[in-house]
Image: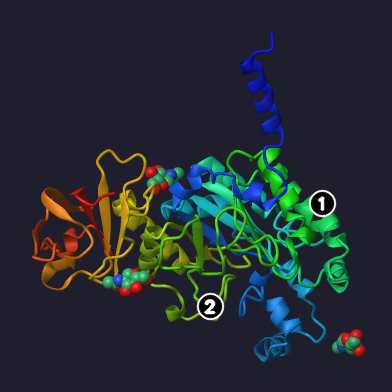
Amino acid sequence: MFSLASLLVLGFVALTNSQYQPTWKSIDSRPLPSWYDDSKVGIFIHWGVFSVPSFGSEWFWEQWQQRKLKPFVDFMDRNYKPNFTYAAFAPSFTCEFYDPEQWADIFNASGARYVVLTSKHHEGYTLWPSKVSWNWNAVDVGPKRDLLGDLANAIRKKTNIRFGVYHSLFEWFHPLYLYDKSNDWKSQLFVKAKTMPELIELVNIYKPEVIWSDGDWEAPDTYWNSRGFLAWLYNKSPVKNTVVVNDRWGSGIACHHGGFFTCQDKYNPGKLQNRKWEDAMTLDKSSWGYRRTANLEDYLSMEELVSTLAETVSCGGNILINVGPTHDGRIIPIFEERLRNLGKWLSVNGEAVYESRPWTYQNDTVTPNIWYTKGGKNAVVPSVYVFVLNWPKNNQLYLGAPVLNSNSKISMLGVKDILDFKKDATGGIMIYFPQLTPDVLPCQWAWVLKMQGVVNYQ
Ligand SMILES: *[C@@H]1O[C@H](CO)[C@@H](O)[C@H](O)[C@H]1NC(C)=O
Ligand SMILES: *[C@@H]1O[C@H](CO)[C@@H](O)[C@H](O)[C@H]1NC(C)=O
Ligand SMILES: *[C@@H]1O[C@H](CO)[C@@H](O)[C@H](O)[C@H]1NC(C)=O
């Protein structure tokens, strides 16, 4: 008998075989796997041959030989033989101190829940032994080691962190790319010989759960075959159920289509967004790759890092915090210190961050530098969390957004006492902070209040 149930089963099989079509409408309709929104904090790693000159930024090659910017040209003239090529830096990408288990330990201690490594930046050098990157990959030249695979293994072995990759679609100087460009993108030699095989290889071998695409902006998504790739990724790939991608899949696509939105670098809109988004930012304010000439003030302070995190999470974003390791494989102590400090802060305040959701208000209506979240799907008691970036004068904090009554309860994460508060005639509340000496402060940068019984919780 041809039952309704068997029809449904057949329909289901047809759907699961090619549930997503290579159209933006279909691709955009895929629900973002929930682990991503719940995670909130990720680590970005920019590492490659550019880590050898470690001068200026990871755009070194382009700035030296394409734009011919004076500081880069002078740097080469002063320090290298005439006619030194960028490729000649690769043997010095030695990574002799690279200890992926130690990296995994630092990342885990930061409280991050996913890691995104540059599998290949715009220079084209792959951190894994790609079959389509002949003599321009980490096993053929430089460390002679599968840097990417070793990090993926260490992270998966030692932690619950999810492993993801950054991948640049374009390569500044690849002859096939330049050929297609000169054809006004009517040929696709580069995409067919390089980009697609490379992406498919990455996914099949390393099973990344984030694909953070970049280097898309010169050519349309039709040139890149982005929709075809994403339909394959979502329908058939080994990570089809858990993978998340960003939005950099062709000129005009960022901020419009794909998975989560990154829009532009260091995107931090300060307002609630309709779609899940990510603030990809970097601890060295001027570079993503390691930079030997960075000064102390070029690194984000803990106050800046925590305040960016609070603002981002309040407005529905994730934060992707970048570090640039050195050519010999180290994460320098200043990055390590920021990451471990962040982890200490999250160990007290993580309840307001992980799995949280934006509240009705993102920031306060009266007092500046106050950000809100509310408890997520696993919260037992509905709570509103208040990120207080500066300790209030006279220990008194005035808030305009939450409506409280006599059953409401306020505490500070990491502190046992219940806090007193008083309503004023306009409905705002004055909260009396505990008088804490530094030795009993729960944390050093930004304090989080937890409010229960908030009348306007919804
Ligand atoms: C550098 O390259 C140019 C052009 O190929 C050549 O004429 C010149 O002799 C080279 N200089 C050195 C020092 O090798
Ligand atoms: C990773 O971090 C979590 C908390 O942030 C901790 O509970 C766990 O023990 C850590 N794992 C390792 C292997 O260090
Ligand atoms: C809250 O954020 C909005 C939007 O960015 C801004 O206009 C407003 O001034 C902020 N409120 C306070 C009190 O800082």
What is the C-alpha distance between the residues marked 2 and 1?
Answer: 33 Å
Instruction: Please determine whether, in this image, residue 37 is positioned above or below residue 62.
Output: above
Kind of element beneath mark 2: loop
Instruction: Please determine whether, in this image, residue 304 is positioned above or below residue 227.
Output: below
Which quarter of the image is occupied by the N terminus? top right
Q: For residue 317, say whether it is visible.
A: yes
- Say left or right for 88 vs 382: right
Q: Which residue is mark 2?
A: 286
- Say left or right for 22 vs 361: right
| Percent coordinates x, y for residue 242 in the rendering | 58, 41
| Res. 262 image quadrant | bottom right
Mark positioned earlier in the residue sequence (2 or 1): 1
Instruction: Please determine whether, in this image, residue 356 is positioned above or below residue 44.
Output: above
455, 329: nearer the viewer: 455
The residue type indicated by label 2 comes to: Ser
- Residue at the outermost top position: 1
The residue type indicated by label 1 comes to: Lys
